[in-house]
C-alpha cells in the first residue's frame, strides 16, 4: 500500500504560497496521476481484499432478514419504470408507494428493471403488489451490494491520498462496515451506500483540487436524491468562493460560466423530458410532499421531537390542573404519536414547513460566513458536517436515516484531531442508537446490538490510541 507523506503548511515551500492567500493543505498533498473518473491504479492489498470479502459475506448472510416497506417501494418503482412510458412515471397511483425520487434515480430504476425482467418477469409486473418471493429478494439485495462498491472505491481513493494513512485506513473500513449502512440498506432496505459513494467522490474531487468535477458530481447526486440539498449551502459557498473567485474576491468569469453550464446541463438532462411534457409541477409535488407532516413515522431525535414531547406534557398539565389555556382539539389525537401524517400541536402553535426552512437556513448561515472567509477544504468539510447536523435537527419531516448526512462527512474529520474524534465518537454512538427503532423484529434485535457494539470497539479503540492528546 502506498503511503503519502503527511502534509501541513510547514511542508510547503514558502515561495509557492502567494501573499494573503488561504492555503489548502490537501491541495498540496502528493497527487496520483489519474483522471477523476478512473479506477485506482493501485492494486488492492491483501487486507483490503479481505475486508471487501468479509463485508460482502456479511451482507449475503443478511438476505433473509427483516425487510421494511421500502423493499416493496423499490420493487414497485422497478415495475413503474419498466411497464409505463416516462410520461406516466410520476402520475401512477397503482400502488400507494408512488415514485417520489428525482429523475436520475428513476432512470437508475429503469436500468435495474431491464435486468429484473430477465431474472423474474413478475418483479416488474405493475399489478403484482407486495411480491416478495426469493427471486426478488435476491435480486434487490444483490443490487444494493453491487452498487455499494462505488462507496468502497471512493473510500479506497481517500486512503491512497490521505495525510494520515493509518488513521484513514481505520476510518475507511469503519464507513464500509458502518452500522448505519448495514441497518438501513442491507436489512431495512435502501440504496444509501451507493448515493453516499457519489457524495464521497464529490468530496474527494474537492480535496484533490478538481472543484468543477466536485460540483458536477454533487449536481448529479441531487438528481438522484433531493435530500442532499441540505448540504447545498456548503457546496454553493465553497465552490463560489474558492473556484469562481480569486483570492482578492474578484469573480473569474470563465470558471463561473463553466461551473454554471455544467450544473445547468446536468439538471437539463435530468428534468428536461418532464419540462418538455409540462410535468414539472407534478414532479415537484412528488418530491416535496409537505402534507406528510413535521415528524416522520418513527421520530428522529431532533428539536421537533422535543417540541412535540413538550406539547404532550403541556396537554397533560392543562387537563390535570384545568388551566384556562386554549387547546387545539385536532392536536389531542394528532398523528405525531408515531404515524405518517400531519403533525398538529394541542397547546404549542403549529410549525409549518416555512418555519423549519427559515430556522435551518439561519443557523447554517453562521458557519457559511466562516466558510466564505476561509474557503479551505477543512472548512468545507466542517460546513458539510454542520449543514447535515442542522438539517437533521431542524428540517421538515426528518427521517432517522438523515443522521448519515452528518456522520459521513464527520468521519472524514475524525482523524484530524482528538477534539474531532470525540465529537465523531459521541455522534456515532447516538446516531447509531437512534436507528435501532427501524429494526423492531425479535430476530434483528441481537444483530443490531451486537454488530454495533463490535463495530464501535474495533473502530473507536484503535483510533483513540492514534489521536489521543
Image (cartoon, rainbow, N blue to C red):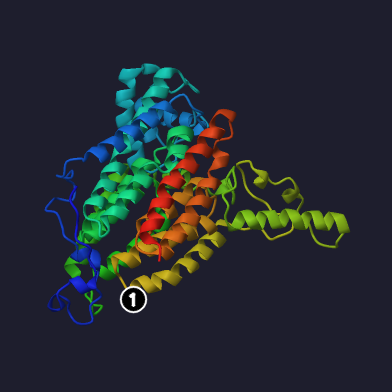
The residue at the far front in this view is 465
Residue 183 versus residue 100: which sits nearer the camera?
A: 183
Q: Is residue 400 left or right of residue 367?
A: right
The residue at the far bottom in this view is 19
Q: Residue drawn at (39%, 31%), measured in percent from left and top?
A: 58
Residue 403 versus residue 165: which sits nearer the camera?
A: 165
Q: Secondary structure at mark 1?
A: helix
The residue at the far right in this view is 322
Residue 137 position, x and y percent, is 42, 23
306 shown above or below 98 = below
Residue 80 position, x and y percent, is 40, 29
Q: Residue drawn at (73%, 49%), measured in percent from left and top?
A: 330
Q: Is residue 411 left or right of residue 160?
A: right
Residue 287 position, x and y percent, is 45, 46
Residue 264 position, x and y percent, is 27, 55
Q: How many marks?
A: 1
Q: Is residue 84 visible?
A: no
445 shown above or below 201 = above
Residue 142 versus residue 7: which sits nearer the camera?
A: 7
Q: Residue drawn at (31%, 38%), measured in percent from left and top?
A: 51
State the residue position of label 1: 373
Q: Is residue 92 left or right of residue 207?
A: right
Q: Is residue 37 visible?
A: yes
Q: Residues within 10 Å of mark 1 (few under 14, many from 20)?
A: some
Q: Quadrant of the C terminus?
A: bottom left
Q: Based on the displayed image, in which of its 4 quarters is residue 442 positioned?
A: top right
129 shown above or below 414 = above
Amino acid at each position: 500500500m502506498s503511503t503519502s507523506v503527511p502534509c501541513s503548511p510547514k511542508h510547503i515551500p514558502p515561495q509557492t504560497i502567494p501573499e494573503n492567500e488561504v492555503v489548502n493543505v490537501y491541495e498540496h498533498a502528493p497527487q496520483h496521476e489519474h483522471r477523476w473518473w478512473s479506477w485506482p491504479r493501485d492494486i488492492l492489498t491483501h487486507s483490503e481484499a479481505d475486508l471487501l470479502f468479509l463485508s460482502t459475506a456479511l451482507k449475503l448472510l443478511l438476505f433473509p432478514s427483516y425487510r421494511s416497506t421500502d423493499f416493496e417501494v423499490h420493487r414497485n418503482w422497478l415495475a413503474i419504470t419498466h411497464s409505463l412510458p416516462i410520461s406516466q412515471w410520476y402520475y401512477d397511483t397503482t400502488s400507494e408507494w408512488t415514485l417520489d425520487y428525482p429523475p436520475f434515480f428513476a432512470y437508475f430504476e429503469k436500468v435495474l428493471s431491464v435486468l429484473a425482467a430477465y431474472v423474474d418477469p413478475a418483479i416488474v409486473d405493475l399489478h403484482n403488489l407486495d411480491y416478495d418471493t426469493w427471486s426478488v429478494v435476491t435480486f434487490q439485495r444483490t443490487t444494493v451490494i453491487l452498487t455499494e462498491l462505488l462507496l468502497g472505491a471512493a473510500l479506497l481513493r481517500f486512503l491512497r491520498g490521505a495525510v494520515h494513512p493509518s488513521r484513514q485506513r481505520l476510518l475507511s473500513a469503519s464507513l464500509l462496515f458502518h452500522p448505519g449502512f448495514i441497518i438501513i440498506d442491507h436489512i431495512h432496505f435502501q440504496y444509501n451506500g451507493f448515493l453516499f459513494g457519489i457524495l464521497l467522490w464529490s468530496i474527494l474531487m474537492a480535496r484533490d483540487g478538481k472543484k468543477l468535477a466536485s460540483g458536477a458530481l454533487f449536481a448529479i447526486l441531487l438528481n438522484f436524491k433531493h435530500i442532499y440539498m441540505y448540504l447545498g449551502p456548503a457546496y454553493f459557498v465553497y465552490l463560489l468562493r474558492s473556484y469562481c473567485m480569486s483570492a482578492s474576491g474578484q469573480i473569474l468569469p470563465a470558471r463561473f460560466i463553466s461551473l454554471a453550464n455544467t450544473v445547468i446541463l446536468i439538471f437539463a438532462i435530468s428534468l428536461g423530458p418532464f419540462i418538455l411534457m409540462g410535468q414539472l409541477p407534478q414532479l415537484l409535488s412528488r418530491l416535496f410532499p409537505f402534507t406528510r407532516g413535521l415528524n416522520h413515522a418513527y421520530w428522529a431525535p431532533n428539536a421537533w421531537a422535543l417540541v412535540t414531547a413538550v406539547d404532550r406534557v403541556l396537554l397533560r398539565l392543562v387537563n390535570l390542573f384545568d388551566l384556562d389555556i386554549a387547546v387545539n382539539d385536532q392536536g389531542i389525537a394528532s398523528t405525531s404519536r408515531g404515524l405518517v401524517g400531519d403533525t398538529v400541536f394541542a397547546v404549542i402553535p403549529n410549525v409549518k414547513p416555512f418555519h423549519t426552512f427559515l430556522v435551518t437556513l439561519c443557523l447554517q448561515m453562521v458557519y457559511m460566513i466562516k466558510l466564505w472567509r476561509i474557503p479551505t477544504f477543512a472548512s468545507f468539510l466542517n460546513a458539510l458536517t454542520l449543514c447535515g447536523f442542522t438539517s437533521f435537527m431542524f428540517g421538515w419531516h426528518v427521517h432517522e436515516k438523515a443522521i448519515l448526512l452528518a456522520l459521513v462527512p464527520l468521519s472524514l474529520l475524525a482523524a484530524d484531531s482528538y477534539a474531532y474524534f470525540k465529537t465523531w465518537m459521541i455522534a456515532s454512538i447516538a446516531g447509531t442508537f437512534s436507528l435501532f427503532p427501524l429494526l423492531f423484529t425479535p430476530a434483528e434485535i441481537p444483530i443490531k446490538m451486537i454488530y454495533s457494539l463490535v463495530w464501535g470497539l474495533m473502530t473507536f479503540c484503535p483510533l483513540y490510541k492514534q489521536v489521543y492528546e
